[in-house]
Image (tube, helix red, strand yellow):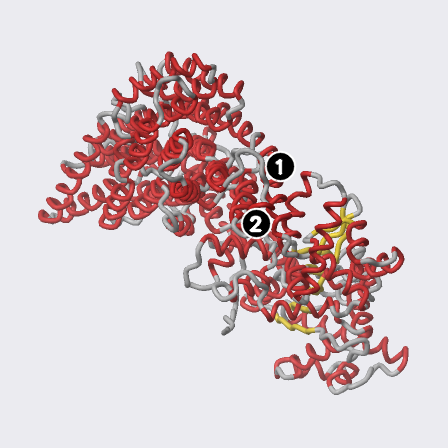
Amino acid sequence: MSQIVFSSPPLIGRDEELARLLGVLERARGGEARAVLVAGDAGVGKTRLLDEVTGRAARTGSTVVTGHCVDLGDVGLPYLPFTEILGVLAADARFASVLAAHPAVERLLGAGTDPAGGPDGRLRLFEDVAGLLAELAAVAPLLLVLEDLHWADQSSRDLLRFLLSRGVLQRPGGGPERRLAVLASYRADDLHRRHPLRPLLAELVRLPAVERLELRPLPDPEVARLVRALEDRPLSEAVVRGIVARAEGNAFYAQELFAAAGADAGGVPSGLADLLLIRVEQLTETGQQVLRTAAVAGRRVEHDLLREAAGLPEEELEAALREAVGRQLLVPGDRDTYAFRHALTREAVYADLLPGERSRLHGAYARLLAARGGAPETAAERAHHARESHDLPGALAACLEAADHARRLGAPAEELRHLETALDLWSSVPAGARPSADGIAPVTLTLRASVAAVQAGDSHRAVSLTRAALAEVGEDADSALAARIRYTLAGNLISVDRLQAAFRYSSEALALIPAEPPSPTWVWAAATHVVAARHLGADETALSIAHRALRVAEELGMADARADLLISLANLEGGGRRSAEGQERLRRARELARSAGHGPVEMRALFNQAISRLEAGDLQACLPVLAEALERARRTGLLSSPYPLGMRYLQLLVLYTLGRWDECLSAAAEAASVLPATGAFAAGPALYAAAARGDAGAVERAEALLEGPFNWMGTLVAGIVLTDAAALRGDPETGEERMRATLAALGDGSERRPDVTVRLAALCLTAVADRAVEARRAGDAPALRRWADTATELVEQARASASRDEEGRPQGPEGQAWLARAEAEWATATSGPDPAAWEKAVAAFAYGDVYEQARCRVRWAEALLAVERRAEAAEQARAARATAATLGAAPLLERIDVLTRRGRLTAATATDPAGAAPLTAREQDVLRLLARGRSNRQIGEELFISVKTASVHVSNILAKLGAASRTEAVAVAYRRGLIAPEPTGAG
């Protein structure tokens, strides 16, 4: 296999650490000498971070010298890293005179042994090195880097101790400032208890000018970003997630796993395995034996279980464990357990086992666990060990026990995994050795697995499993079972938006089972058919069957089915789920489902309660319902099932709509680790916020939602982000292309959700209207006709879809607001900006969508400016700007500022200084840097904030001071006494 070479992997996920080191460099440039000890496990990214820092330091005029420590065993070359540093300096003619002034230092350059020559000579050498570095720092800021300090020889450690404690970091009384920074890295996982670097580190960190920076493993989302950034070749989401899970935050491991992806994705890359095993081979033979035995147990193993499996006396085991812990290969945990420090080390050790050795140890663990009484919580372990030791009957029984245990714990993903393993094993186990309990057969296990797949958030897998169950039942199968399989398949098909097929199978289910005598199977078949019929618009059929099934459910005392049917009726009858009658039905349904212990139906009731409030425009009332529902889903293990995923989306959507973007992004980040691959759409509103803030990565993340099996909501989220992104770029052609592709992919679903078409059309119309305005201004009649015709086509599509919702009722506030915006954009394109139309759009979004209202205010201001109503235009621009600044919507801020300057609206909005909004503390900091002529990038670097954040602060300052430019803002600030001229140096 050819290795991929990473010449310079991107620096991802280290913003805080980078800012801290750059701050040290900045203070050093100002004369405050500092040192930082950079700690982290091998491969975590120390070298990459230091490369970034040294590169920036060199570009800003600092002298950068680096020395590397090398593993040369117990007897290393003295002063090796410092010899390397001096060699670099000696090769540079600029430093010849400085080196000549320090003859003791020159002895290091050719020394093969310690050149100090006794205690006095050693002291002179140390003082000479300190003097050399001080002189270099006087010429230009100096950055001294020492890498891999864990391999440093004793002499180098002694010299470093002298430099940091008595030498270069201290400024002599009245002497020149020391413009010096020292960065020294070391591997934390190499420091066993007797490592000679340990006492030195303990001594150094007590010094006031020395600090320690620990590089912890990268969070999973950052590892995913790193993997995707390594190369342009596409990687599936499953591969990325697999790499992220196995790398455990280690950047080097992630790169090695990425390089091996597609070749042997399940194993440890050979080069990485060799690297990991080197540390294992440093143990004694007994230590290696214990580590091999522990690797078979898994990532973590109990002390007693390890002792019995290894077959060692307690004293030998403890000595071996102490050695493994000291080498930081194992770490002790709670309840007398030990865990591998990194999972890949365990994988490498496990892969290095001989086949017979591996099978023997698995068998030992299986017997030991079974001898302990076969507790349910150990069933998964027993199943694994039994299978790996080729005890297939024992593995099958343990898998089924583990599946039952997972269901009781509310862990559907684990239940699904165990059931699928059991199905794989079934045919390999002799009939007489299989479990004989009622209900245990391939068809029923497959059906049960499909239910677990739905609850785990993998609806496509659920469809596949239910189809497999259907294929297994023959013509003479029990009609109740055949009907159950079909209505289960119908429900699963609904969740993946295969509505025609769902209706067909639910119809077959009803035909297979008679309505008389009443039976639970018929009731559930009917309830599923009601949902399928409603989705296809067959409301009369749905209503008739729903009322009949509700009566039967009441007769049979089926509270869960009654709840499900009440939810359908709440959507079908009267004023729908938004009406008082609909709300009461949903409340009763929720109580019935909870009393019956039917979590999925309870989730459906909660979802409908929440979305009804959203549709009514009551956003504040929606949030507590969603919070309670998601907590309930968490407690019942249903967070990944369809309705809780939809509620997660709704929760983020409400936060986004209300302008609580930081909360939205934070909640999405917290949810990222628990969302299934098919539920990535649930974080969609966070993409809306990221795109509105100018995050270029939002488009890439939106496109990723279109990969893999079709997902209706994922396609919708991607369509909104990508259409809006094209509109923001002023690209109406791409915007219209994205819109039409999205509607085509959504199919009938876009007719069920007419607000989808209206929103996409309104987003497209923004860029179309802008093109029409440009053509009108340029007198380009053909172009104007073209864009006006396009606008008319889009608005007619919006009008046609917005007239009714999926239940045939008028649209709610959100749909009406998007239609108002579409109408205003159409007017702009066909006849010119219409202030009245934009006033209506602004009022329509007053139900709570603060960002869209601000965008409409900007368009209103443009329309007012076009008819010379400047004071009103300035008022709308000012209101929009306040919202955009609060949200951090940089692209919108930029558009407002361009409009303000072009329309000279600042004069129209000038206020009395006494009434002006005060500057925040951060804005005062930014203002002072503006007065020094700093650019936004320089402001960001000096204040450790992003360039975008700096830009937002600058825009806020300009608005508050009523200034049209940075220069004017500084002048106004001086006049008002907000800043004082800085004193010049004494002549």
Give the vertical position of 556 relative to 244 (above or below).
Answer: above
Q: Name the residue under label 2.
A: 430
Q: Can residue 179 be seen in this view?
A: no
Q: In what element is the residue under mark 1?
A: helix
Instruction: Classify 10 Å Cα crowding around label 2: few (below 14), some (14-19), many (20 and above).
Output: few
Q: Callout 2, which amino acid?
A: Pro
In front of the other: 147 or 216 = 216
Q: Mark 1 points at which residue?
A: 405
Instruction: Classify 10 Å Cα crowding around label 1: few (below 14), some (14-19), many (20 and above).
Output: some
Residue 55 percent location from the top left of the image: 56, 67
Q: Can residue 959 be seen in this view?
A: yes
The residue depicted at 54 percent of the width and 43 percent of the height is 419
Residue 468 percent location from the top left of the image: 41, 44
Mark 1 to mark 2: distance in Å? Answer: 25 Å
Give the vertical position of 480 relative to 705 (above or below).
Answer: above
Quarter where residue 803 is shown: top left
Residue 122 percent location from the top left of the image: 85, 78
Of the two numbered discs 1 and 2 on the same chain, state the one appearing first in sequence: 1
Q: Callout 1, which amino acid?
A: His
